[in-house]
Image (spheres, rainbow, N blue to C red):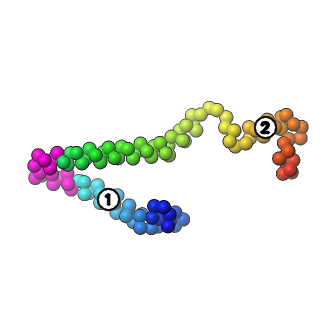
Amino acid sequence: MGPFGFDPATFTGPFLTFITFAQYLVPLGVLEVYLRTQERGGARSRLATAVGLVLLTLALAAGIFVVTLATWMPSIKRAFDSRKSIAGGSFCNDRVRRHRPGGSAISRLQGR
């Protein structure tokens, strides 16, 4: 089991079963509370339902923001960065080959 209650190799586990049901049951429960409050709720219950919906909306917005920062922003930064990356090593290897006849010492050891 991984850290979140599922096996990443087989993609099975109790947490995934919980999420499968929760993704349908939680919105249906919120809708049920909203419809019951709208139908026969007093002022306090309508206010409590409105506050609950606002809190759920803020939690959803915060989750979208965190996922955007974690997954999309690195790709977007990489796409719009015009600087040449030296992480791949080709920049350094090109400079060594230009300045040393016969290439770099590492490439000579590797037989290139």
Q: Splitting the image into 4 quarters, where does residue 79 fall?
A: top right
Helix, strand or loop under label 2: helix
Which residue is drawn at the image coordinates 17% and 45% (left, top)? Answer: 47
Residue type, label 1: Tyr
Judged by its main secondary structure, the magenta piece is: helix
Q: Splitting the image into 4 quarters, where does residue 87 fall?
A: top right
Mark 2 residue crowding within 10 angstroms, few (<14) / some (14–19) / many (20+): few
Tell whether 33 sits left or right of 66.
left
Tell whether 47 sits left or right of 86.
left
Start-end of magenta stretch: 32-47
Image mark for residue 16: none
Residue 34 colored magenta? yes
Residue type, label 2: Asp
In three-dimensional space, the C-alpha distance between marks 2 and 1, rounded to whole angstroms, equals 55 Å
Q: Which residue is tagged 1?
A: 24
User: Is residue 11 in view from this perspective?
Assistant: no
Tell whether 92 sits left or right of 56.
right
Count of numbered badges drawn on the protein: 2
Residue 48 colored magenta? no
Helix, strand or loop under label 1: helix
Q: Residue furthest top?
A: 82
The first of marks 2 and 1 along the sequence is: 1
Residue 50's x, y, as percent? 21, 45
Which label lies toward us, 2 or 1? 2
Compared to residue 82, the image places residue 53 above or below, namely: below
Compared to residue 3, the image places residue 72 above or below, namely: above
Q: Which residue is tagged 2?
A: 94
Residue 54's x, y, as percent? 26, 44
Compared to residue 78, the image places residue 8 above or below, namely: below
